[in-house]
């Protein structure tokens, strides 16, 4: 598909994908319980997180062989160092977090700094206020510049903040992010409103499959139990962002768990 050159053209492209969405979304086969760990981004994004918190996060991630840990920029170097002996567990860094309204150059610099410190994945917050205003060209350019600032093999996940968007806006954000080169579209920061829900995940999966550029879906925000996790995987998520990764794995294994963390992310 030819890349749109103005907001009206973007609107037409987005509408065309909306019109192609199925009336009923498929239910996807979930991985074996012993493999769910490879779908989890173990997350610590508290502003008050200490070095000891990051050490604990990384130790848990290494023990359970999670897909990644997700941290803020100031913790990337420590996380990378901690996980040097666990090459399958990567480090993800949030960008433009949690507001998404940072200047594009600021996001690009943050992404480049994270990559230079060793992060191999970036979780960038889309400029969702502009998305709501229909400023599709600006939203596309914002994602594209971050993509160019930290090129492949660094993975880019674009957080839509679905709690703040309508169905049509979620479709728009998914289309634009995929066409700008995102490896994942992600539901939520967990810092604003409700987190992931099954309907949004299923719709996002259907949209990116229609776009056909290999973009996947990450469900994040409020996923605190094995039941939550499995629901998101069945809806089409390929990654789960959660600070309750250890509890989820223990629940799947039938082990006693600790009370769920009250944090939303």
Image (spheres, rainbow, N blue to C red):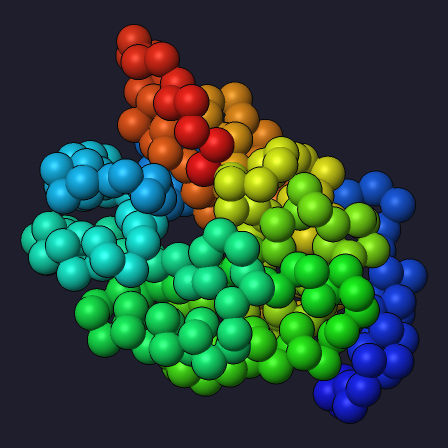
Q: Position of residue 128 (x, y in %)?
A: 66, 60
Asked whether, in this view, residue 157 is left or right of residue 41, the answer is right
Q: Position of residue 230 (x, y in %)?
A: 53, 30
Asked whether, in this view, residue 261 is left or right of residue 14, the answer is left
Between residue 31 and residue 237, name the one nearer to us. 237
Between residue 2 and residue 49, name the one nearer to us. 49
Question: Which residue lies most toward the top here?
Answer: 256
Residue found at x 12% / y 37%? 52
Question: On the rendered image, what quadrant is the N terminus found in?
Answer: bottom right
Please say if 213 is above or below 169.
Answer: below
Classify residue 176 by image quadrant. Answer: bottom right
Q: Is residue 156 visible?
A: yes
Residue found at x 34% / y 40%? 46
Residue found at x 57% / y 64%? 101
Q: Position of residue 109 (x, y in %)?
A: 37, 77
How many numbered marks, from 0 up?
A: 0
Between residue 119 and residue 35, name the one nearer to us. 119
Q: Is residue 152 visible?
A: no
Between residue 40 and residue 159, name the one nearer to us. 159
Q: Position of residue 59 (x, y in %)?
A: 14, 38
Question: On the rendered image, what quadrant is the C terminus found in?
Answer: top left
Classify residue 215 by image quadrant. Answer: bottom right
Residue found at x 77% / y 43%? 25
């Amino acid at each position: 598909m030819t890349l749109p050159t103005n907001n009206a053209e973007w609107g037409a492209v987005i509408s065309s994908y909306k019109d192609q969405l199925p009336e009923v979304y498929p239910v996807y086969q979930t991985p074996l319980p012993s493999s769910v760990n490879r779908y989890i981004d173990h997350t610590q994004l508290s502003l008050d997180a200490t070095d000891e918190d990051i050490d604990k996060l990384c130790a848990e991630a290494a023990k359970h062989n999670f897909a990644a840990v997700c941290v803020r920029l100031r913790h990337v170097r420590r996380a990378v160092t901690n996980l040097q002996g666990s090459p399958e567990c990567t480090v993800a860094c949030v960008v433009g977090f949690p507001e998404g309204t940072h200047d594009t150059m600021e996001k690009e610099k943050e992404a480049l700094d994270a990559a230079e410190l060793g992060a191999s994945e970036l979780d960038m917050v889309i400029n969702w206020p502009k998305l709501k205003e229909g400023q599709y060209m600006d939203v596309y350019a914002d994602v594209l510049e971050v993509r160019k600032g930290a090129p492949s093999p660094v993975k880019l996940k674009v957080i839509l903040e679905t709690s703040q968007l309508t169905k049509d806006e979620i479709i728009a954000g998914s289309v634009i992010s995929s066409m700008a080169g995102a490896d994942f579209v992600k539901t939520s920061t967990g810092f604003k409103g409700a987190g992931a829900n099954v309907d949004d995940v299923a719709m996002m999966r259907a949209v990116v499959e229609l776009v056909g550029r290999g973009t996947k879906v990450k469900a994040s925000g409020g996923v605190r139990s094995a039941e939550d996790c499995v629901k998101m995987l069945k809806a089409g998520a390929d990654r789960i962002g959660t600070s309750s990764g250890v509890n989820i794995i223990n629940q799947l294994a039938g082990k006693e768990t600790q009370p769920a963390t009250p944090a939303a992310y």
